[in-house]
Image (cartoon, rainbow, N blue to C red):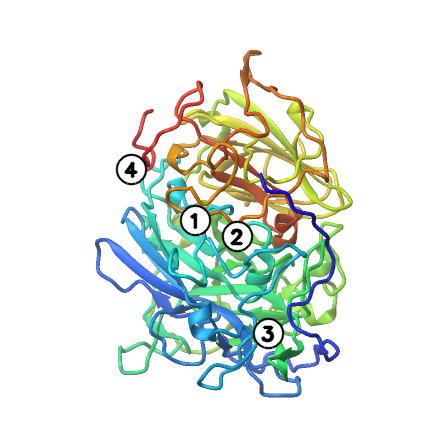
Amino acid sequence: MKKCSIFYGAIFFLGLLGGTAQATHTKFTQPLKLPPVLGLQPNGTYNFSISLEAKDADISVPGLSSSDKTRMWTLSRTGLGTLVGDFPPPTIRVKTGNTTQLTVANNLNDIQGTDPNGTDSSGRFQGLANGTQNGISGDHSEISIHHHGSHVAPVSDGWACGFYIKASGTANRSFTYTYFLQENDAKNNTNNERGTTEWYHNHRVDATGHTVWKGLGGGMFIIDDPADPQLPKGPTVDTTGALFTGSSGQVFAGFKYDVSLAIRDLQFADANIGGTIRHNQIPYTFTFEGSTGDHIMVNGVPQPFFKVEPTKYLFRILVPGNSRKYFLRLQQLGSTTNIAMVQVMQDAGIVSPVSRTIIPIGIAERVGIVIDFGPFAGKTLILQNVQSTRDGGDCVPGNCSTATSEIMQFQVGTTVTQQENINVANITRAVPTPSDLTPVVKRSFRFDRTPAFWVIVREDLDQADRIMDCDRYDSDPVINTAEEWTFRNPGNWTHSIHTHDVDQVCVSRNGASCPASDQFKETWPLAPNTTFVVRLKPTDFTQKDADTPAGGCSSSQPSGDCSNAHLFSTTGGTVPSAPQNDVVSDGATSPVPNVEAAGGRYMLHCHVIEHEDTAMMTQFRVESSPDGTTRTTPCSPPGSCTQ
Ligand SMILES: [Cu+2]
């Protein structure tokens, strides 16, 4: 097992030459743009490809001193052939129940040439290809793409510790992920995943922060749910929102009344790239509490305006940034009356509608909301970030500036292109209840911090602080067996707690019943002094072949290569004496893995990226039976295996 000393602090990839840019740009001066959409293919197996390339992003930051383009990491449509890449990355619309493959290629070095900070033969500025984070050595240009919210075989889960897609060499330059888009959630008889708003992002252990900051996070929407006809859709549009006719040069961007809003922040500054000072760059500054910027971007546009029609829109809102949380509120310009936003999607899928006026949304959470602009023809509405309602503890430097208090503007027109007879009140989609999942095992996790790490502690095991270790798994749920997990945050920082592979049903929050808006999720807003209790039932297996080999993560791994994976040292905490026992609800016990046991496969972690990068992750291995056995082949389709 590799050990590595770690230090934390502000590490800049690029020389930060100028002061940070002032957020003085005039808001609501640029139109919202829509990400390109992959997914026009007919029914059948969908195969999509995207390419990681360091390219200029089509970002214009009014008020900054130059027209220099912002160099980002883009997950671009393949064959784009231009200097400008896709930011945000393309939205992928996948049909529920249809096996879908996503091939991701890492072309960072191919695009950048041999000098990561030089210019290539086309004279393009390079930079950002490599670089390290947190002072950890190793190649941080390799990536692993997690389909967030998916129910998927481990090998396609985007493991943080392996199966890396590499930027150099000849091996492992691309990886094809397979998504079955099937799931049994106890109240969905189709066995297909519910329609919802999911997304995809890099998950490379230790070093995800700089890549998320640079742009690696796009939407992945599960469509063709039985409830879809009751949601706004409208005619097809291009990336400007104009009607899509398929003419040359137009890029398909989904549907007029079904709109993706990726809300994130960035900080712009001058930077030295290849010996040349370039403005409008985004050097990443690691901040232990969570990195933030003072510009709010929606789909890559700072505080945009969006021309809408006086009808109903579905907005799929995701927060693919590093750490900033938002408190969404909608008001008409000049009014203090809150306008209702009807939530029809939680993380795990379409649910019966819940009318809301304030919607807190943290990193990696998603909501689908329907806004009826019908009563506001000719008016102007503002989507605000109501910072005064924050739930304490997460107001970090840069997080409370006025520049971040308004997100975007809606300019409501007076005509409707396509009348739709939408009544979201007709959506009646039950979610599983706690009584559907009687737990056999209970586990409790405390999300805490030490001077050098954010940690996850199995409180029921009386563990000392535990540091994420790729070689270790801390929990061993059994297939088709319900468990109850408690997430407790005794600290003063808000976490976003994400469990891979399996959706969870809320049992209680701080001992009370769960809010109607937070019933069925996989990313939980764990505010300070908050305890969530959830239930879950895994239906996928860890594959034995994909386990970390006994003795440590090594290049002998058959399907991937985790030789460059950094394994956190345990210097930040102590390890418990083994074996310990899980507390089983009937009073019996079952053995849990030793800390040095073979590796796990699914992640439970905080999605504040800087917390995740400083060890706030734990692994669980889904076993075939209580004796600890695992399958050697994927369960295909998920949920169809019984052992
Ligand atoms: Cu956290």
Determine whether 597 is above or below 619 in the image. Answer: above
Instruction: Check disc 2 and report the residue beneath it.
Output: 204
Marks 1/2: CA–CA distance: 10 Å
Q: Quadrant of residue 48?
A: bottom left
Can residue 309 be seen at all in this image of the molecule?
Answer: no
Marks 2/3: CA–CA distance: 30 Å
The numbered mark, 1 or 2, whose residue comes first in the sequence reads 1
Dot 4: element: loop
Nearer the observer, disc 4 or disc 1? Answer: 1
Can residue 298 be seen at all in this image of the molecule?
Answer: yes
Q: Amino acid at mark 3?
A: Gln
Q: Quadrant of residue 258?
A: bottom left
Determine whether 621 is above or below 297 in the image. Answer: above
Dot 2: element: loop
Marks 1/3: CA–CA distance: 37 Å
Marks 3/4: CA–CA distance: 44 Å
Residue 263 lies left or right of residue 353; in this view the side is right
